[in-house]
């Protein structure tokens, strides 16, 4: 499971398909089955590749115990791949040599679950709870403030466990590398850590033997939160029932009813068996010295180990079915979703090919894009456009996170009586696709999207390369071949040229004539939550019944010991830490320049972009009426999918994707970073294209902005309903972000607007608005927004391109500007209004809480802001993490201060609500208690935590956007960074007294979570107002 929680200023879009298996069935015979079926490691065919004879490493040579088996240059990504294998243990080591300062390291283990106790998930947590060399409780979280890592993570997948980090500082890189390697190969795996991280029986009142017993544990609570999302319940059933004879039938992360069957002894045995070096795969990416890594890994961890046959961890292909199957499951009612009669889901999953068949997986990925993405896709036409649902469900897509890949397509928010209609339309769509095939332009648009994705550079290339290859690598596939994207596209184009029915034949094979087909239907059950609670109570009764007097006393004593352990002072000096000289210098960025081109403020950045030009257009919409402003998020979703006067929505979609990366529209609410007294609202349009397609990109911008068409009310109605249907998805996954939006909305009108545009308030507003207004009325509102927003007089632009191409890009940009109208200027900004203190409880039928508290402090460029940011890191690491997470069982917690000047506290997947808010309120008491203990090391660690974010990697296309959107220049970034490093203990004491001693004048508290009796009318939740909001 993802262990690190990052915060942003708004709730994110739903994340991509998760890595972990969500099956809930248990079968103890899996090891025996796999042993018999697969005793030989599958190996992909290795093509003969001619490596650069002048390259520094040579095939066949041995480097520090590792033999170099294969070297290959890859021009698609500008890298050299080196495949090595440890001679003694057989450990595979994949090194990617690339001129990138953001270096990545990971250790992966193949860990197919044998049951649903979540043993590998709990082991992932425990491995990072102290090791032989670093005997500190949870060095993972403690290193977050002793490093400037750009990523520190660990995750449990369906059949593998990954420990990954990245850093641009080599001293830091070596420090974390030592901790990660020692954590996985020499962990302490202490019993008390097992109780904290996994599960335990514990008295509700820890010091009262007679109080009721409860099941607690971080992983246990995390997985309860995970399955509070109906989409995760759906996927658990889908994957487990599609692959019932393999490890995937089990829940790798752990199924809450099964987690309490895990024992500490079993966990230790699983570590011994599955964390052996022979079952490990090590990945290293970037520009740091490979020899130093190989020498350390060999000397400290591998040279004293022998080879071990890891047949038991191999996963065979699943036996194919002779007949399709159907499964029906219940789920919880979503009181923030559609009406109860429409809260149903249906999906079809089909088993595809072996993951190690790289070319076939690639082609099936292209095929499924043709089938589901955009208005020209066959399943979009056949299943979505009839408009009897809320659109594709969250599990739709092509999955290659298991040995057998599979495709799933499903609908959400439809009536149960329409299940038969879905099945009928699915079959009709498949048959029609085989008969009619695919339009060549549609195919080219999908292939162009892939080609562009190779050129486009993200800020974390190394991690992306690993994530895209790790399942393939886990099953012995050719990861190097997986990087040859241009070659795979070429092969596919040749196949399509030689056989005009090439894709139709694949549709017939995998969709029409494939008996390994599973249909899953899901309907809400009013008693679902009560049944889960009853099952938990029964489980506790059963556990207690099996205990004798000595066992019960041990439960009580373990609770006391764990509390003492959590509160004990540790010697963190054993952990490595950067020094001031390691982080003294700020990052260097290409210079941005400002020009006024045709009266449009234009920011230009010359940066190596790999033959891509990036365009950002920000339209000031501060002057829109409140009624129009509330519909801007819907407008952002509709405008790019509705077509233009010149082209239908289908034609325009093909044009856009064959010439650009597509359009992205977002609404931005930005407070003044200098004085914090005003804010502005903007509509941001983003796109990019290959340099050769820049003329087309600007022509498409022109057509979309000036000629968007809203006349097709049937399509508009479908887009609106689909938009509303998806709004509540992902709330439980990103609940801490929604909670912070909610608490901030109680502090200022700018923050309230953000919540109305992207928080839970927006969900409520849109549901009511769509019910109360006709499609025609909404159309007129949307048209009004576009007619006022897209004007040169309200526009600012940022262009990132290479130095050589910039003159050409500007030439086409100026032609684009000539056609834009000049309308009446919008209001530049609004005065910020602060509110009286208040609280809010949003009732949502999920088993965990997300709590937040916000108060207004100072704007970003105020001299106290960096001091408060350092203080937030100190509070997070030294107070909130030990209390809210370790002692009280929340999965995550923290404090932060944003660009908006709001200081926020939050908790994530929290079993408590008012108890957590009490912890937030007692921050000043804690700060007073440690006042005399504040020292330079504590201060410096907090500074490092801030520098992680201040120096966050930036992709070429995003350089300069902080200045463009927020108004923070490079000089101000350097000044801010310098202020962070110069913060003193006395500075901290000053802001503590200034901002925490007295209750702030403008404060908001927010709970997103289940109804609790103690919250109904309980003024203790807030010293001011308690506003309970219920959605049904």
Image (cartoon, rainbow, N blue to C red):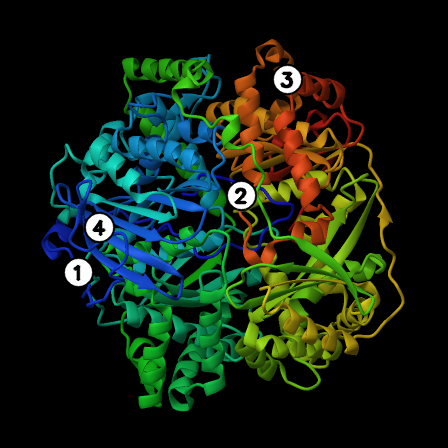
* Image position, residue 725 (x, y; %): 60, 62
Marks 2,4: beta carbons within 8 A:
no
Q: Distance between the residues labelled 3 and 1?
A: 58 Å
Residue depth check, mark 2 versus mark 1: number of the one nearer the observer: 1
* Picture layout, residue 192 above or below residue 458: above
Dot 1: few (<14), some (14–19), or many (≥20) neighbours within 10 Å? few
Can you tell which mark lies on residue 116?
Answer: none
Residue named by callout 4: 84
* Image position, residue 696 (x, y; %): 61, 79
Residue named by callout 1: 43
- Residue in view at x 47 percent, y 38 percent: 149
Q: How far apart are marks 3 and 2 (CA)?
A: 42 Å
Marks 4,1: beta carbons within 8 A:
no
- Between discs 3 and 1, the one toward the N terminus: 1
Residue named by callout 3: 985
Residue depth check, mark 2 versus mark 4: number of the one nearer the observer: 4
Q: How far apart are marks 4 and 1 (CA)?
A: 15 Å
Residue depth check, mark 3 versus mark 2: number of the one nearer the observer: 3
Left or right, 448 with respect to 1020, comes to left
Q: In which quarter of the image is residue 783?
A: bottom right
Dot 4: few (<14), some (14–19), or many (≥20) neighbours within 10 Å? many
- Between discs 2 and 4, the one toward the N terminus: 4
Q: What kind of element bears circle 1? A: loop
Q: Quadrant of residue 632?
A: bottom right
* Image position, residue 382 (x, y; %): 49, 79
Q: What kind of element bears circle 3? A: helix
Residue named by callout 2: 846
Q: What kind of element bears circle 4? A: strand
């Amino acid at each position: 499971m993802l262990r690190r929680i990052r915060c942003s200023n708004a709730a994110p879009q739903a994340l991509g398909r998760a890595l972990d298996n969500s099956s809930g069935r248990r079968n103890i015979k899996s090891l025996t089955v796999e042993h018999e079926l697969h005793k030989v490691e599958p190996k992909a065919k290795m093509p003969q590749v001619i490596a650069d004879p002048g390259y520094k490493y040579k095939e066949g040579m041995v480097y520090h115990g590792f033999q170099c088996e294969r070297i290959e240059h890859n021009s698609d990504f500008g890298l050299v791949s080196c495949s090595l294998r440890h001679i003694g243990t057989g450990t595979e080591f994949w090194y990617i040599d690339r001129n990138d300062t953001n270096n990545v390291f990971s250790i992966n283990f193949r860990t197919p679950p044998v049951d649903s106790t979540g043993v590998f998930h709990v082991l992932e947590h425990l491995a990072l709870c102290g090791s032989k060399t670093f005997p500190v409780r949870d060095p993972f979280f403690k290193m977050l403030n002793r490093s400037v890592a750009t990523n520190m993570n660990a995750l449990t997948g369906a059949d593998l466990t990954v420990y990954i980090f990245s850093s641009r500082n080599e001293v830091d890189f070596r420090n974390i590398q030592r901790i990660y390697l020692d954590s996985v190969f020499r962990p302490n795996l202490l019993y008390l850590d097992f109780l904290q991280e996994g599960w335990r029986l514990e008295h509700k009142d820890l010091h009262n033997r007679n109080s009721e017993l409860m099941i607690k544990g971080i992983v246990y609570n995390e997985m309860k939160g995970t399955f509070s999302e109906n989409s995760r319940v759906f996927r658990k059933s889908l994957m487990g029932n599609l692959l019932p004879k393999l490890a995937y039938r089990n829940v790798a992360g752990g199924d809450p009813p099964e987690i309490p069957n895990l024992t500490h002894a079993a966990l230790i045995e699983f570590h011994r068996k599955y964390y052996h070096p022979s079952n490990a795969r090590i990945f290293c990416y970037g520009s740091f010295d490979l020899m130093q890594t190989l020498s350390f890994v060999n000397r400290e961890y591998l040279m004293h180990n022998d080879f071990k046959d890891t047949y038991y961890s191999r996963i065979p292909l699943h036996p194919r079915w002779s007949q399709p199957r159907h499964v029906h499951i219940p789920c919880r009612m979503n009181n923030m979703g559609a009406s109860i009669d429409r809260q149903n889901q249906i999906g079809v999953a089909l088993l595809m090919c072996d993951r190690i068949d790289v070319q076939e997986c690639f082609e099936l990925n292209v095929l499924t894009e043709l089938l589901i993405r955009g208005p020209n896709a066959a399943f979009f036409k056949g299943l979505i456009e009839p408009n009897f649902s809320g659109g594709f469900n969250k599990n739709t897509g092509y999955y290659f996170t298991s040995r057998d890949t599979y495709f799933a397509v499903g609908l959400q928010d439809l009536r149960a009586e329409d299940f038969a209609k879905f099945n009928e339309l699915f079959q009709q769509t498949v048959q029609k696709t085989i008969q009619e095939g695919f339009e060549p332009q549609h195919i080219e648009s999908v292939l162009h999207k892939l080609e562009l994705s190779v050129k486009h550079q993200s800020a974390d290339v190394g991690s992306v390369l690993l994530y895209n290859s790790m399942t393939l690598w886990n099953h012995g596939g050719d990861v190097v071949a997986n990087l040859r994207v241009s070659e795979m596209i070429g092969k596919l184009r040749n196949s399509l040229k030689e056989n005009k029915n090439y894709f139709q034949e694949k549709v017939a094979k995998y969709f029409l004539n494939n008996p390994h087909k599973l249909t899953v239907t899901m309907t809400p059950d009013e008693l679902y939550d009560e049944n889960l609670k009853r099952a938990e109570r029964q489980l506790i009764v059963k556990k207690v019944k099996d205990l004798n007097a000595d066992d019960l006393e041990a439960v009580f004593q373990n609770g006391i010991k764990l509390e003492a352990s959590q509160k004990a002072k540790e010697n963190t000096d054993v952990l490595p830490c950067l020094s001031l000289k390691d982080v003294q210098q700020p990052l260097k960025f290409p210079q941005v320049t400002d020009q006024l081109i045709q009266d449009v403020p234009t920011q230009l950045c010359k940066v190596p972009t790999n033959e891509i030009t990036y365009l950002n257009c920000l339209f000031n919409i501060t002057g829109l009426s409140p009624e129009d402003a509330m519909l801007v998020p819907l407008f952002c979703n509709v405008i790019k999918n509705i077509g233009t006067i010149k082209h239908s929505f289908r034609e325009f979609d093909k044009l856009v994707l064959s010439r650009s990366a597509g359009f992205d529209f977002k609404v931005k609410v930005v407070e003044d970073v200098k004085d914090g007294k005003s804010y502005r609202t903007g509509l941001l349009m983003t796109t990019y294209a290959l340099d050769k397609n820049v003329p087309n990109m600007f022509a498409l911008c022109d057509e979309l902005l000036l000629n968007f068409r809203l006349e097709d009310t049937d399509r508009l109605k479908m887009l609106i309903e689909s938009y509303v249907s998806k709004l509540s998805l992902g709330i439980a996954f990103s609940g801490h972000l929604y909670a912070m939006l909610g608490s901030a909305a109680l502090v200022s009108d700018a923050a309230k607007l953000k919540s109305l545009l992207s928080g839970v308030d927006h969900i409520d507003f849109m549901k009511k608005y769509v019910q109360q207004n006709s499609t025609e009325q909404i159309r007129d509102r949307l048209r009004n927004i576009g007619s006022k927003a897209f004007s040169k007089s309200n526009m600012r632009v940022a262009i990132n391109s290479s130095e050589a191409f910039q003159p050409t890009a500007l030439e086409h940009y100026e032609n684009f500007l000539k056609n834009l109208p000049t309308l009446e200027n919008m209001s530049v900004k609004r005065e910020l209004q602060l509110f009286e203190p208040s609280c809010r409880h949003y009732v949502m039928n999920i088993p965990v809480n997300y709590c937040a508290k916000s108060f207004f402090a100072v704007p970003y460029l105020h001299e106290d802001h960096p001091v408060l940011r350092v203080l937030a890191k100190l509070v997070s690491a030294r107070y909130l993490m030990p209390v809210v997470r370790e002692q009280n069982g929340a999965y995550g917690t923290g404090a932060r201060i944003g660009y908006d000047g709001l200081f926020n506290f939050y908790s994530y997947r929290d079993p408590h609500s008012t108890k957590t808010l009490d912890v937030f309120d007692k921050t000043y008491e804690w700060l007073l208690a440690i006042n005399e203990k504040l020292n330079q090391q504590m201060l410096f660690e907090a500074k490092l935590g801030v520098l992680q974010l201040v120096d966050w990697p930036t992709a070429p296309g995003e350089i300069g956007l902080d200045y463009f959107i927020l108004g923070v220049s490079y000089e101000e970034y350097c000044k801010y960074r310098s202020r962070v490093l110069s913060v003193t203990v006395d500075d901290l004491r000053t802001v503590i007294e200034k901002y925490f001693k007295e209750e702030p004048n403008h404060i908001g508290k927010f709970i997103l979570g289940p109804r609790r009796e103690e919250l109904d009318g309980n003024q203790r939740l807030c010293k001011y107002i308690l506003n309970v909001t219920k959605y049904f």
